[in-house]
Image: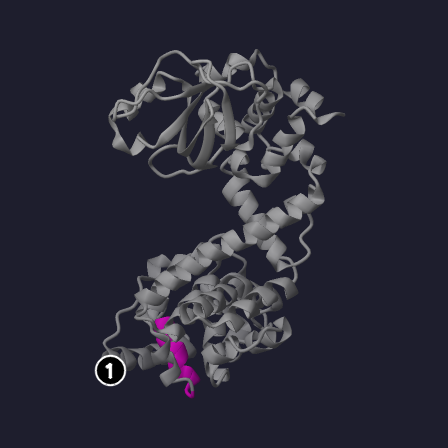
Amino acid sequence: MDMQMAYAEVVPFRDTDVLLDPAFPYGEDLLQFIWEAGLYDAHDLCTTDGEALEVLKAGRIQHNSGPDLNDAVVRVAGQTWAGTVEVHLRSSEWNTHGHQGDPAYNNVVLHSVYLHDAEVHTADGRRLPTVELRGRIDGRHLRLHQALMESRREVPCTPYLREVDPARVRLWLERLLVQRLERKVGEVEALYRRNGNDPNETLHHMLLRWLGGPVNAEAFSMLALALPVRLLLKYRDDPARVEALLFGQAGFLDDGPQEDHPRRLQQEYRWLAHVHGLRPVPAAAWKFGRLRPSNFPTLRLAQWAALITTRADMPAELVAHDAPEALRALLDVEADGYWHTHYRFGAASAPRPKRLGRAMADSLIINAIVPYLFAMGRIRGFQPWMDRAMALMERLPAEQNGITRMWDQLGLKAANAGQSQALIELKKTYCAERKCLSCAIGAALHKKCSPA
């Protein structure tokens, strides 16, 4: 079925003046998009005063305060003007929004509106050139946007996704990976400053947070702040004290444990807490409900203790490789001894190895080590670390989760971890928020709606 016809069949539609209908709440955003992308009939374009108009540069949509589009260049009656463009459904909204008294709008060179219903002026008294787009917009754009906004699917454009050029999708995924990584790197840099510019503490915090998974991430972050890695490394030759510090600071030793192992840890922790002036995290911060035993925070802490005590120079080793196999080998630790028959204190289970596991190792590499490497490379101006981070994303396999499986069913199968991260970003930041006008896929669908 032709995509344009399909949208017409999916969504009942009235007429192009639906932009002015309060029941169509996406009008101004759509009009901004149409103006920026040039998806209107520009034949014999003129202002409402009848002066010839050429749009040399439509401008770029910006989402901060001030005019809607920056860096615009237009020619009105032969005179070229550079500045900003303001977009409204009705001209009168210029005054409704108070722009006539705001000097920030004095550099507007063109008022782009759907319906011209009032003459308007800037704060310095200049009459604003206006172009009316009513009658110049193809109704298929409105049908398309209405369909996307009102879709109940997780991915609004699901029926039409295969209409988009795969090369365009690949380029978009590359941009999304950079966008996602930039946001994570910003978080690492903030954490680095919070930790007094200490790289080891920053990596410790990143790894612990992701070790907690989505359910216990905040609790693990609290623990990272309450227990510096330098203190753990001080006792790394004594596994009992490392465990005592971790479980004691996590608040898991406060209930008078009955078994020998946790009781010994409690005694050790009391001395360590006195010597180092430690205060534990509230035990109530931890969650066990709806978690598989292999993801219990107690077991993850035991595995972290094993990592601290079996890796002589753990922080430095984890950032020294760009081969996933080498990093997996470093993270391949097992919580043994007491933990061979336990997932949590006081509840014995059948004997079973408690290795960290490849899936968790890859998750730590993707979500903690890669952003850390990139951030430290940027902070220190050391490009090889940034390159190593990107190489890891290309060499690691795609993540397997609900989001990536959904995309796989829609025909977008991630080839590596970089693409799976990009698809997660696409789903969470664009599809879930219905930001189709900011999405390259949505833009491509709109362009396919335009007459050849």
Label 1 amino acid? Val
The quarter in which the N terminus is drawn is top right
Vertical arrangement, residue 112 with respect to residue 290, above or below:
above
- Identify the magenta region: 237-248
| Residue 48 visible | yes
Q: Residue furthest bottom?
A: 237
- Is residue 243 covered in magenta? yes
Q: Is residue 110 left or right of residue 136?
A: left
Tell me what residue is drawn at x 41 percent, y 83 percent. Answer: 240
Residue 322, horizontal then vertical, whole percent: 59, 73
**Nearer to us in this view, 266 or 128:** 128
The residue that appears at 40% across and 38% down in the rendered structure is 63
Q: Position of residue 273 (x, y in %)?
A: 27, 77
Q: Is residue 131 above or below residue 166?
A: above
* Position in image of residue 45 (x %, y %): 53, 19
Q: Between residue 15 and residue 77, name the one nearer to us.
A: 77
Q: Between residues 388 and 351, which one lies in front from this camera angle?
A: 388
296 to 17, vertically: above or below? below
Q: Which residue does the image show at 24% across and 82% down from the upper left?
A: 275
The residue where tag 1 is placed is 275
Question: Which image quarter is the C terminus in?
Answer: top right
Find residue 378 and report its image quarter: bottom left
Relative to 385, 265 lies left or right: left
- Helix or strand or loop: what does disc 1 sit on? helix
Please indicate, yes or no, whether residue 344 appears anywhere in the rendered image: no
Position of residue 417 in the picture relative to residue 185 (left or right): right
The residue at the far right in this view is 1
Going by the image, does 297 lie left or right of 176? left
Q: Which is the main secondary structure of the residues drawn in magenta?
A: helix
Q: Residue 415 colored magenta?
A: no
Q: Determine crowd level at label 1: few under 14, some 14-19, many 20+ residues with C-alpha closer than 10 A.
A: few
